[in-house]
Amino acid sequence: MRKWLLIFISFLLAFMLTLVPMPEWAIWFRPAWIMLVLIYWNVTSPQRVNLGAACIVGIMLDLLNGTLLGEHAFAMIVTSYFVLKMQARIKMFPLLQQTFCVWLMVFLYQLLIYCIQGFIGELPKTKWYWASSFVSMLLWPGVASILKSFKRRSRLRMAS
């Protein structure tokens, strides 16, 4: 039960960070917090956080953002599919390769969102749209280490 609670709390914090107000100029630099947390749990606990979880989290993000229902869900499912397929490799990669892999996955997520928005005629009008994947890549080592330490602490509490 504690493992599920830890996963739930990490997603809740990611949603809260997604909602933090930012100045107009900095909006394009907002990391993909929810995608980073989803990638982490896909890699470390694929039996708990799988495509179903990606769908639920994506629909929640759609509802939160007021976007086309299923837009983020579809992008998260496709991205999670690739993460889950490569899960064993990503887990064994050194941090630098993991960081590059995370950039690719967040870029894929953004590309899918971009394509969907293009189909409905709501393309972003700035080239800064892609900055989020780079910021997410730079934050990956910190996010992964924080989630890893919380996971380790919860195991210690469960053992005692």
Image (tube, rainbow, N blue to C red):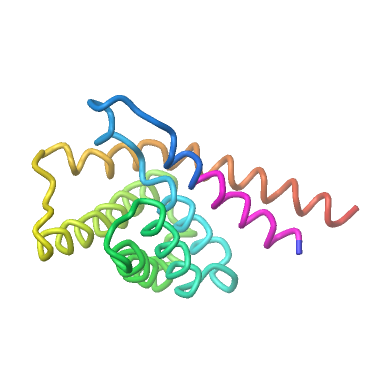
Q: Quadrant of the N terminus?
A: bottom right
Q: Residue at x 42, y 42 (%)?
A: 18
Q: Is residue 68 left or right of residue 13?
A: left
Q: Is residue 65 left or right of residue 94?
A: left
- Say which quarter of the image contains residue 105: bottom left
- Say which quarter of the image contains residue 81: bottom left
36 up-or-down from 2: above or below: above
Position in image of residue 76 (x %, y %): 36, 64
Position in image of residue 113 (x %, y %): 23, 59
Q: Residue at x 45, y 74 (%)?
A: 51
Position in image of residue 155 (x %, y %): 77, 54
Position in image of residue 25 (x %, y %): 23, 26
Q: Residue at x 10, y 39 (%)?
A: 127
* Residue 8 sits inside the magenta stretch: yes
4 up-or-down from 47: above or below: above
Q: Is residue 17 left or right of residue 122?
A: right
Query: Which segment did they paint magenta?
Result: 2-14
157, 93: nearer the viewer:
157
153 up-or-down from 82: above or below: above
